[in-house]
Image: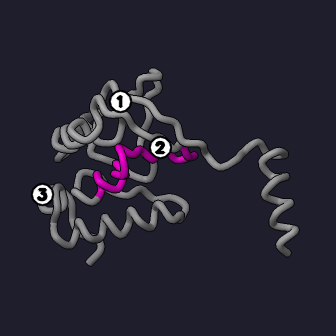
Amino acid sequence: MLRFVAIVSIVLPIVFGFSPPEPYYVQVVRVHSGDQITLSTGWRVTYACIDAPDFAGNHCYAQDAAQYNYDLTMGQGVRVVETREGAHVYVGSTWINREMVARGYARVTEGPMSPERKALLRAERDAAQVREGAWGICWEDEHE
């Protein structure tokens, strides 16, 4: 069985053209919202597994979410790990996706369960319970 797993882990990336994402290190040059930034490469990335309030439609807490993301990331060197759902972004040891959720500036999106999504859901539940950020103002606690 172990031999099979070893062979599959080598062959699948070659045959199907995928492999675990490699992180890259860049600087944040613009913050668009609570879940989108532009990097020094010119790439605009959206955070994986989370959704912050949007400016379009004047969503409650959109400005607060964008400002908090700005405070955390603008001008900072970040580590970016791309996934099919977007990017996981880190400033030092701080996982920005989780920080946005834990402080009530973003919610977890629906999608396939992963260790990252599980961690984000725990942070969301905790933020909702103490009515952190938008949980006390804009959103209902569905975790009760």
Residue 142 placement, left or right of 110: left
Of callouts 2 and 3, the N-terminal one: 2
Q: Mark 3: which amino acid?
A: Ile
**Eye-nearest disc, 1 or 3:** 1
Query: How many numbered marks, from 0 up?
Result: 3
Asked if residue 57 shows in the view, the reply is no
Q: Residue furthest front?
A: 92
Q: Residue at x 45, y 59 (%)?
A: 110
In this view, 66 is above or below 132: above
**Neighbours of disc 1 within 10 Å: few (<14), some (14-19), many (20+):** many
For label 2, count other residues whose C-alpha is less than 10 Å away and answer few (under 14), some (14-19) or many (20+): many
Question: N-terminal of the two: label 1 or label 3?
Answer: 1
Give the quarter of the figure containing the C terminus.
Answer: bottom left
Q: Which residue in the structure is indicated by mark 3?
A: 137
| Magenta run includes residue 16 | no
Work out whether residue 64 can be spotted.
yes
Residue visible at 83% across and 72% down in the picture? 2
Task: Specify the quadrant of the image occupied by residue 123.
Answer: bottom left
Region of the chain picked out in magenta, as a range: 82-101
* As drawn, 52 above or below 102: above
Coordinates of residue 111 in the picture (x, y in percent)? 51, 58
Helix, strand or loop for disc 2: strand
6 left or right of 120 in image: right
What residue is pinned by disc 1? 28
Q: Which mark is residue 87?
A: 2
Nearest the viewer among 142 and 112 is 112
| Quadrant housing the N terminus | bottom right
